[in-house]
Structures are given as C-alpha cells and as structure tokens.
Image: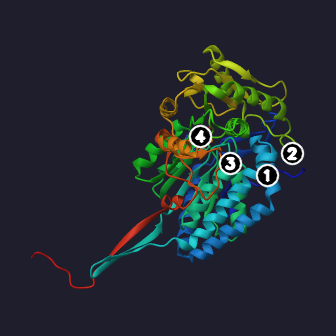
Amino acid sequence: MAFDIRPAASHFVNGQPVEDEAGTPIPVICPVTGDEIARVHAATPAVIEDALASAEAAQKDWAAMMPRERGAVLKRAAAIIRERNRELSVLESRDTGKPLSETLVADATSGADALDFFGGLAATLTGEHIPLGGDWAYTIREPLGVCVGIGAWNYPTQIACWKAAPALACGNAMVFKPSETTPLGALKLAEILVEAGAPPGLFNVVQGAGEVGAALIADARVAKVSLTGSVPTGKRVYAAAAAGMKHVTMELGGKSPILVFDDADVENAVTGAILGNFYSSGQICSNGTRVFVQSGIKERFLERLAERLESGVVMGDPLDEATNYGPMVSERQMEIVLGYIEKGREEGARLIAGGGRVDRPGFFVAPTVFADVTDDMTIAREEIFGPVLSVLDFEDEADAVARANATEFGLAAGVYTSDLARGHRVVAALRAGTCWINAYNLTPVEMPFGGVKSSGVGRENGRAAIEHYSQLKSVYVAMGASDAPF
Ligand SMILES: NC(=O)C1=CN([C@@H]2O[C@H](COP(=O)(O)OP(=O)(O)OC[C@H]3O[C@@H](n4cnc5c(N)ncnc54)[C@H](O)[C@@H]3O)[C@@H](O)[C@H]2O)C=CC1
C-alpha cells in the first residue's frame, strides 16, 4: 500500500502538527528491514510548555460541555477510526512490525471500542444522593484536570485510546507521550479527535524518551499520570507522581501463569498457550509465559504445541495478510530476548521449539518453547517480553497455585480445566488482576484490565476506569439551623 507514513510533524499541540527540530532526533526504524522509515524529534521545553498550557485551557470548556456532547465527539472519533482502520493498521504494522492480520483486528479497532464505550458512559457519570435524617448530602463526579498518558511500544494506538477515552469522557484533557520506539499512531489519534470535534488542546501528543515523560509528570498543572510500561519505569514514575500527590494508573509488566490441568481439553489449552505467548511475537504484558502443565497430559501438550508451531507459523512481510508472525519491535528487544533464550539453555531447560534468531532480514526470533523449566530458572522469573514459552510440571493443584503466586508480578493468569468448580476455585486463589478460565488474553473494553502487586495500580477499561479519571466532591446540605456547643 503506497501511502506516506511520515507524520506532518513530530508533535500535535493545540489542534495542529508542531515541529521543533531543536529536539533530539528520534529515528523510526522498520523492524522488518532495519531501515529508517520516518524521523521525529523529542519535545523541547517550549513544546512541552505549549502542550500543557493548551491542555489546561481546553480542559475547562470541555468539562463545562454537556457530557452527552463530549460522548458524541468520542463516538465520532471511533467511527472515523473504523472507517480508516486499514490505513491506521498499515501504519501500526510499519511502526511496530506486527502483522497486518493482527493490527487489522486488535489495534485501532480496540481503540475505537474504547472511544465508543467511554463515549457512551460520558452522560451517565453522576454522583449520588445521601439521606441523613433531615439533612442530606450529594456527591458530584468531577474531572481531575490535565492528565498525562505515557505509552509502551507494543500497542501504540490501542494504549493511546485506552487512556484518552476514559480521560476525555470524564472531562479531562490529556498530554500523551508515546514510546520513543513507536511514535506514529498517537499522532493519528490526535488528528482524528480534532476532526471529530474535540477542541484544540484537548488531546496533545509530544514525542521523546524518559526525560520528556519525567518533565510532564513534574509539572504542577498535571493532576494524573497513566503509564503503560515496565515495572522499573513504573516505580520511577509512581515516585515522581507521589512527590506532587498526583493520581496514577500503572499498567506494568508481568510473568503470568497458565495452569493446564489433566482434565483440560488439550487442543484448547494449546490454543491458549499460543495466544498467550506468541501473538504480537510475544510482546504482550499479560502473556502467560509460565505454563504449568499437570503431568498426565504434559507430553501430549508438548507434542501438539510443537506440531502447531511447526505447521502454523507464517513469518514474513507484516503487510502480507497471510503473515501471522512478525519480528521483535527493535534490534535491542531482539538482543534481550536472545539473551534469555541462551540463559534458558545454560540453566538446563529442554528446548522443544525455536531457540534463536531466524535467518532472514529483520529482527525475527523463532517462537521458542522450553520444557522441564523449574521455578528458580531465570526464564521462569523475569519478564522476557518476547516469544519464549516455559513449560513447568506440576502434580497437585494447591502446589501449582502456590508456585504460580510466587512472583513479584500479578498482572494476569489463566486456568484450563473441564471442571468448572476447579476453574473458579483456582482463579479465586490466584493473585492476579485479570484472569481467564478456558481462554487467554481476551481484553474486551467492557472488562476492567490491570494488575496487582508489582504489575500495577488502578484499572483500565470497564466502568472501573472512571474511578481513576474522576474524583468526588461531597456536599453536605443542612435543612435546619447550625448547632455549636457554645
Ligand atoms: N500492563 C500493561 O497494560 C502493559 C504493560 N507493558 C509493559 O511495558 C514494557 C515494555 O514497554 P517499554 O516501552 O519497553 O517500557 P518502558 O518502561 O521502557 O517505557 C515505557 C514508557 O515510559 C517512558 N519512560 C521511561 N522512563 C521514564 C521516566 N523516568 N519518566 C516518565 N516516562 C518514562 C518511556 O519513554 C516509554 O514511553 C513491558 O515491561 C511490558 O510488560 C506493555 C504493554 C501493556
């Protein structure tokens, strides 16, 4: 498809593209060829100032609008995204390397779902009436003000929408900083929101690495920070936000377990393990990278997993819709993943599939499966963020649950069993924010998503997200005279 993916300018501020070439250049590298396909510049202090000032100015009028009208803008943006899904998906595929067969169904469309959902909720965000004998109180749900969104590189457009939609529905403005690895998708969202009727300055995009994010968080005009990123970055961002007593949402990393019991439908469990490890070439925070398989079906599970990887994976040009498996987002990420595969070998895990770089241009790593992984191995403890699935053995349910919980992370978990009582019992005992029974990695916008322990704070999606982009004002109303002791 021959359209120019280079953006009009690096940033989008106060309703228009803005350039300032004094900022550090950020090359956009195509993960399939290694070529530079676009170039943006990091935001200078002047660009950051304009973005925050225009957000602050736009927010007041936006919050004063009829909530239904705010919702209508978000729904129009969703409709425009759906109309342009193919173009936006091509852009996302070129920015991230993810196959078009994925981006067509999981990126901009998921963003549109969020804009539709929160657009619909906008008019329902009311307070409550609290009777107090003769007196009474009521609450008003108010916006927070200017929110900062900071994105990761694996789902650039989806992350921008998942943060913008609830923020704007509640009457906030946003300054969004995409990952420096994937700067393009959020700029399109900014343009589309303006086209849908959002006032200039309501949603701004500024580019840059951690310093730009840090400068945004430190600004006194910012009331809230929502980050999608790694746990170490989350700790830094949370600490910086705490210094200004700002609200936070932290969507961080994971090392999630999938428990496959002897009574599971093996084929279905293999499907879950594939979805939970190899979609987006493994670059998904909620991936179930520790697959605990009960001894009775272990060999059958491994056999079918290896067969399906052998026959089903189609690597290649992400823009070819037959391709279902792309490269790592960057050379750096590829090196990180290859390092973990080496560690797995050194520490004695049994390689069942993959195990290295693929002999072709681009940053491709073969879908890799290790069996006989033990809890102490590095590949079972650390987030890899790549296509490396570890199979761990277990015999006993309670033991498997205890081992699944023995991690600092708590983003997600899955259970495969045909015994529904077991499914619910195990999920109740797992310490994870998002769980699936006989499914994996499905994240409809209606369902809250987020982690516990080091995997995060707050929830995105669902009605739950509203709590994290609004605050309550309580008003006590006396119906009689005030009463004082003297
Ligand atoms: N829980 C979730 O919803 C998701 C979590 N992730 C996590 O994201 C990570 C991968 O993404 P990366 O981009 O490599 O993460 P990262 O943590 O390196 O960067 C995330 C974002 O934070 C920014 N940043 C870095 N230092 C900062 C600072 N001091 N202040 C403000 N901003 C700063 C980066 O520029 C980037 O935009 C993985 O660990 C993954 O698990 C990814 C997708 C979803």
Q: Which residue is mark 3?
A: 156
Q: Are marks 1 and 3 in contact (CB under 8 Å)?
A: no
Q: Are marks 1 and 2 in contact (CB under 8 Å)?
A: yes
Percent x, y for residue 104?
79, 51
Q: CA distance from mark 1 to mark 3?
A: 14 Å
Q: Residues within 10 Å of mark 1 (few under 14, many from 20)?
A: many
**Label located before the other in sequence (4 or 1):** 1
**Label located before the other in sequence (2 or 4):** 2
Q: Which residue is mark 1?
A: 104
Q: Which residue is mark 2?
A: 321
Q: Residue at x 64, y 34 (%)?
A: 385
Secondary element at tag 3? helix
Percent x, y for residue 205?
64, 55
Q: CA distance from mark 3 to mark 4?
A: 29 Å
**Label located before the other in sequence (1 or 2):** 1
Please tell me whether residue 302 is drawn above or below residue 103 in the rendered image: above
Which quarter of the figure has residue 176? bottom right
Q: Residues within 10 Å of mark 2 (few under 14, many from 20)?
A: few
Q: CA distance from mark 1 to mark 2?
A: 9 Å
Q: Which residue is mark 4?
A: 415
**Label located before the other in sequence (3 or 2):** 3
Amino acid under disc 2: Glu
Tell me if 118 is positioned left or right of 95 in this view: left
Residue that sits furthest to the left in the current view: 486
Amino acid under disc 4: Val
Amino acid under disc 1: Leu
